[in-house]
Image (cartoon, helix red, strand yellow):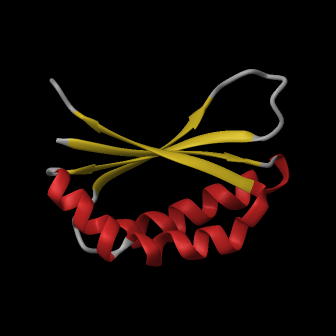
Amino acid sequence: MIVFNTTFHVEEEIHEEFVEYMLQHFIPMSTKSGLLTSPRLSRVFGKEEEAGHSFAMEFQAVDLAALERWNSEESGVVYAPLLEKFREKMAGFSTVMQTIS
């Protein structure tokens, strides 16, 4: 099983809107084809002096080929509105992992 995780850091004033957008729009768009499954949005706790909030958005894919297909065929449609909506108030990075047990 492949785990696809994107960690986002968002500014304080948009964090509630960001969570709502992720739950109402981002997750349904990401899982529509079935290539990504098992969505899980989590709050990431870090240093209290950091301004803003961090969130981890995690999906599963059956294999790397499925994830690569999602990336090439669907990710642009999913990420473009997110980036447009939150612009400079959000930053993120993605990690791909393989489940061992």
Position of the N terminus, as image quadrant, is: top left
Q: Is residue 6 left or right of residue 47?
A: left
Q: Position of residue 67 (x, y in %)?
A: 25, 58
Residue at 16% in and 58% down: 65
Q: How many labels does the image show?
A: 0
For this view, does 59 lie left or right of residue 101?
Answer: right
Q: Quadrant of residue 80?
A: bottom right
The relative height of residue 44 versus residue 57 in the rendered view (above or below) is above
Tell me the quarter of the picture where residue 90 sits.
bottom right
Instruction: Note whether 26 is above or below 16 in the view shown.
Output: below
Whole-percent x, y for residue 18 in the image: 67, 58
Residue 51: give x, y in percent of width and height: 83, 36
Q: Which quadrant is home to the C terminus?
A: top left
Residue that appears at 27% across and 59% down = 36
Give the x, y percent position of residue 29.
Answer: 41, 73
Q: Is residue 7 above or below residue 66?
A: above
Q: Which residue is drawn at 52% across and 61% down?
A: 23
